[in-house]
Amino acid sequence: MAPTSFELRLFCGTANRALGERISEVVGLPLGQANIRRFSDGELFAEIEENVRGKDVFVLQPTCSPSNENLMELLIIIDALRRASADRITAVIPYYGYARQDRKVAPRTPITSKLVADLISASGANRVLAMDLHAAQIQGFFNIPFDHLFATPIFLNYIKENKLDEDLVIVSPDAGGVERARAYAKRLDVGLAIIDKRRDNPNESEVMHVIGEVDGKRCIIVDDMVDTAGTLTNAVEALKEHGATEVYAVATHGVLSGPAVERLNQSSLEALLVSDSIPVGEKQNACSKIRVLSVAEILGEAIRRIHTGESVSSLFV
């Protein structure tokens, strides 16, 4: 299919500059020039330092920690591009913050992921490209086109290349992640197990028992994110108690907040595979078990296809 008549431009916020540079190499374009700074009182300011009138602009910015700062920066950049007469603005959000607040779980509580969706749309974004949402229904919170990609291919390649698929069982850390774990098990043609857990307080979990056969097997726990690592490390110990020989974990987003690194270091986990959707450099240095794989190829190819009007459905794997 012929390219669109308007030129492609790629901008990157400050949240994950390294991923932005990798994507620019994949796309074959330098990152756009933008001056992002703060006033003395902490207010953010963004100035686009090149002509974007009539351009097809993609803005990369995960809304990871500090979530509020990075979200506001994304909104301000989009607003600046809209006022500079960009023809189309696509927000590329490798990690969608506030995704866990996708429904009311108690009276008088917000649905913050919907609020964030409204803010992104109101700022002037014409399209959103995100990866491994915590809840797939968040796509429905937007009234603009939304492309939901998965980091599954890069993790599957790593598993196969390192021969981790021998005597393997894929494990879902909870009932809500069964669909994700089943996708891995199906593509690797291996067994599936589920951890039954009960959560009493936020960021705290108690593993109850394992559903499935893991005795004498290598296990890979599959999840969309690892935050404080409480759920993950409890699951690792439960699997070990049920006879698992080795336990690995795969999580697209390495949030790794609070005591996560300490818990990983003290656990029986062999390795944790995460993507570079969130910068984890310092945490990787503090924990030798963390392996980082890049999603730049997937995001770069999606950006290219969206720009040229090609189908991106083959990337939804």
Image (cartoon, grey):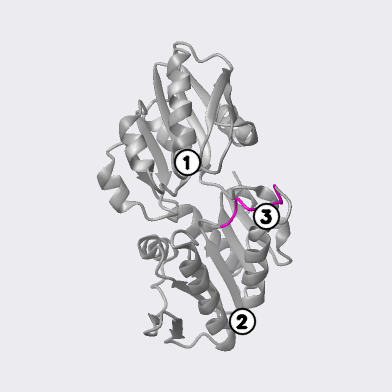
| Count of numbered badges drawn on the protein | 3
Labels 1 & 2 near each other (Cβ < 8 A): no
Q: Indicate the quadrant containing the N terminus: top left, top right, bottom left or bottom right.
A: bottom right
Q: Indicate the quadrant containing the C terminus: top left, top right, bottom left or bottom right.
A: top right
Image coordinates for residue 187, horizontal then vertical, percent: 57, 30
Q: Decide: few, some or many residues near mark 1? Use Cα within 10 Å; few <14, some 14-19, many ≥20.
A: many
> What residue appears at the point 45 percent right and 83 percent down from the top-left corner?
45
Q: Secondary structure at mark 3?
A: helix
The answer to whether residue 55 is seen in the rendering is yes
Residue corresponding to mark 3:
138
Residue corresponding to mark 1:
251
Of badges 3 and 2, nearer the viewer stands 3
> What residue appears at the point 27 percent right and 38 percent down from the top-left corner?
288
User: Could you say which is closer to the camera, residue 126 or residue 98?
Assistant: 98
Q: Is residue 100 magenta?
A: yes
Q: How far, Cα to Cα, is label 3 from label 2?
A: 25 Å
Name the amino acid type tagged 3.
Ile
Q: Secondary structure at mark 1?
A: strand
Q: Which mark is drawn over residue 177?
A: none
Q: Is residue 132 above or below residue 181?
A: below
Q: Decide: few, some or many residues near mark 3? Use Cα within 10 Å; few <14, some 14-19, many ≥20.
A: many
Q: Is residue 317 magenta?
A: no
